Image: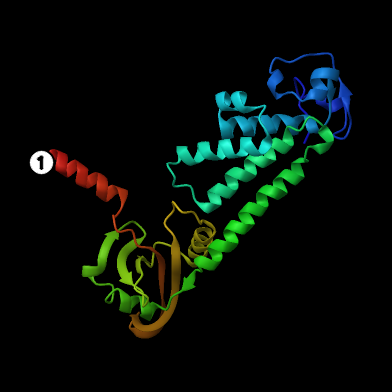
Amino acid sequence: MMPKIGGFGFSRFFDTTETFNTSEVARTSVYMPPEYVSKRQITPKFDVFSLGIIILQIMAGKESYTKYADIPPKEFIEHVYGFWVNRMQGTISKHTSREVRTCIEIALKCVESSQVKRPTINQIIQRLNKIDIIEFSSIDELYRTREFAFEFLERITNDFSDLNKVGSGGYGDVYKGVLDNGEEIAVKKLHQLGIDDEQFKNEVNNLMRVQHENIVRLVGYCYHTSQIFVEYKGKHVSASVVERAICFEYMQGGSLNDQLSGMILLYLH
C-alpha cells in the first residue's frame, strides 16, 4: 500500500519500499505510528498502523478504545467481544463471533510499536479471506443447491394450484410446496417470456453466491424443456416449451409488503 503524506503529489518521489523522513507534523497524531512521532519516519507500515487504529475504534468505539488502550491484548479482546455480544443482544452467531475476534486480533497486530512486527496488507487480506472460505465451506455443506425436476415441483405444489399460490410479481408466480422431508419451500415459477436462458443462469449463479443468515436462502432451481405440437401457418410443427423456477426457503410471516399492508388496513379500520 502506498503511504499517503499530505497529498498525492509528494508520494510520487519515493518507492513503496522506501523510508522517508519529513519535518511536517499532521494533526491526527493518534493515527501515527511511534517511528513517525519520534523520528518523522514514514514506511509502508505507516498505513498499517493507521488501519489498526481505525479498526479498533470501529470495533470498540472511540471512548472505549481510549479507556482500554493500555490493558493487555487478551483482556482487550474479551472486553470488545463482550461489548459486541451485548450490542447484538446475545444473538451473535458463531461465524460473527469468529469475525469479531479476528478483526480485533488483526488490529492489535497492526498497532504493534515495532513496525517489523506489524503485518503487511497482503497478510491482513489473506487472514480475512480465510474467514470467508471457512464460512462458505460450512454453508455449502449445510445448504447444497438442488436441481429439481419440473414434475416434482408440480407434485409438491398440487400442479401449481391457486390454493398453493402465495404471491405473484412481474417475473412469475410464487407457490408453496412441501419437500419429502417436510421442509416448506417457496417455488417461484417464472413467466416464459419474462427472462431468457442467459438471464436465468446468471440469476441462479448470483443467488447461489449470496449466503447469509438474514437473506432468504436459495433451496434449488428447475430448468425443464419439452416439445409440443402447435399449428403454424396451417401446419402442425414442433415447438420447445421452457419451464424455469427458483425455489427459496418458505417464510411463514409472508413478505414485508404483506405485513405493512396489514398494518395499514388495521389502522384504517
Q: Nearer the viewer, residue 263 or 104?
A: 104
In the rendered image, the quadrant that contains the N terminus is: top right
In the rendered image, the quadrant that contains the C terminus is: top left
**Residue 10 in view:** no
Is 22 placed above or below 121 here? above
Residue at the spot 44% in from the left edge and 45% down from the top edge: 90
Which coloring applies here? rainbow
Q: Secondary structure at mark 1?
A: loop
Q: Is residue 123 left or right of residue 233?
A: right
Name the residue carrying label 1. Answer: 269
x then y, percent, for residue 106: 69, 41
x then y, percent, for residue 212: 49, 54
Is 268 placed above or below 35 here? below
Q: Nearer the viewer, residue 152 or 48?
A: 48
Is 139 placed above or below 214 here? below
> Badge 1: how crowded within 10 Å, few (<14), some, or many (20+)?
few
Figure quadrant of residue 119: top right
In the rendered picture of this protein, how many numbered marks are placed on residues?
1
Q: Is residue 191 left or right of residue 51?
A: left
Residue at the spot 29% in from the left edge and 73% down from the top edge: 157
Q: Nearer the viewer, residue 103 or 264?
A: 103
**Residue 92 in view:** yes
Figure quadrant of residue 29: top right
Residue at the spot 59% in from the left edge and 62% down from the top edge: 137
x then y, percent, for residue 196: 46, 65
Q: Is residue 226 left or right of residue 132?
A: left
**Disc 1 residue type (three-letter):** His
Taking the view exactly as shown, the residue that stands out farthest to the left is: 269
Q: Nearer the viewer, residue 5 or 116?
A: 116
